[in-house]
Image: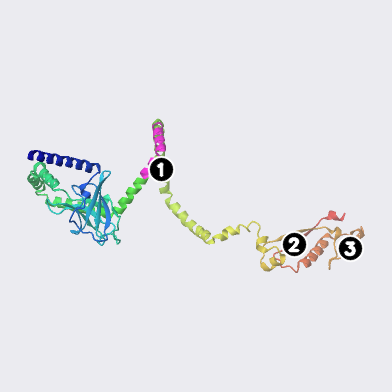
Amino acid sequence: MIRLSRTRRAVQAATLALVASVALSGCDFDVYHLPLPGGTDTGDDPITITAEFADVLDLVPQSSVKVNDVSVGKVTDIELDGFNALVTMEIKGDSELPSDAIASIRQTSLLGEKFVSLSAPAGGGSGEQIESGADIPLERTGRNPEVEEVFGALSLLLNGGGVAQLKTISQELNLALDGREDSARSVLTQIRDLMGTLDDNKADIVSAIDSLNGLAVSVRQQQGSIDAALEELPSALDSLDRQRDDLVKMLSALQNLSDVGVRVIKRSKDVTIQSFRQLQPVLTNLADAGDDLVNSFNVILTYPFVDEVVGRDPQVARNLHVGDYTNLSVQLDVDLTDLPEVPGLPCFELDAIPDDVPLDLAQLCQDAQDAIAKWLAPLTLPKDFRLSVDIDPQSFF
């Protein structure tokens, strides 16, 4: 009976364990979501932030979150977001962290546990404090190398690396530089100067590269025209090849022409220089004349009777040109068939002249001139003004 009851209790325990495991698996149970004792106290007003990591190693929920190696919170959840891990952290609300804080996964010791380290960026970060719900992107997260990775790299260096060849490399360098230390130093100095010059002209180099990029873009846009030109180039070269003899003759003739031109210029150099020297005063006076020379063409063809110069009013013209004169000759054709009464000139009817009375035409012309001169007396005339009166005898008959 005792053996039977023990067997029965074992069967009941196994059945209970099986039922519990099935129930827990059906409820999607996660042991990391169970409230565990201990851990960092986040206070009464904690904030929740997330960080995206490319690799979280073996970081688990309930791991510590530290700022300057002081625990300020804990990891509450780790989820897979695409190919990256999304870590949710709960930290104290009074943690002094900027809004652009960085996060990295570190170890407490060589074989210690993993924790998330939060810190400000190298420049000090922004002046704003991090708030609940903030997200630290993948660009501001990282992790330290694992011990296994360090040992693996060290093993590769010691076994398959170049450590064994360091002595050989050092010896060969000594042989190569033996007696050439000054040359090597000079080369290094020139390299340093070159690097300094490149650094000083960095902006110009970048500008040149940008200009070259713009040129490349322009060439790419004109690729169709360039292709068409390249397609026409063979025919153009064939045409040049066919006309090569003519081109050679033309160049030879051009060379002969240049030789003749050189000889002519050398022989006429003194005369040419003298001509330019003689021409210099003329050109200087023309330059000094300025606009006056151009304006003179408005009056030179009709001088002195130009309305724009003497005015359209005769009285204004007399006032403007009192005392001025030019060679002026006036010829009047006088018709005596209807001669008015002029003081000092005898008036008579031509029909009343007897046939036997001779008609003195010369005296008649003189009398007419005297009368016209009296008419013109109030006017200001040039001193060399000449007046002639022509009488047509045919007007008497």
Q: Which mark is residue 348?
A: 3
* Residue displayed at 31% across by 53% down: 203
The front one of 78 and 212 is 78
Q: Earlier in the sequence, mark 3 or mark 1?
A: 1
Closer-to-camera residue (274/84): 84
Label 2, on which residue? 387
Q: What's the amino acid at mark 1?
A: Ser
Residue 74: image quadrant is: bottom left
Q: Amino acid at mark 2?
A: Leu
Residue positioned 43% across, 52% down in the render: 270
Determine which residue is flagged by label 1.
Answer: 258
Q: Label 1: state its secondary structure.
A: helix
Residue 140 relative to residue 338: left or right: left
Mark 3 Cα-neighbour bin, 10 Å: few <14, some 14–19, many ≥20:
few
CA separation in Å, label 2 and label 1: 67 Å
Q: Where is residue 294, by image quadrant?
A: bottom right
Residues at circles 3 and 2 in contact by the CB criterion of under 8 Å: no
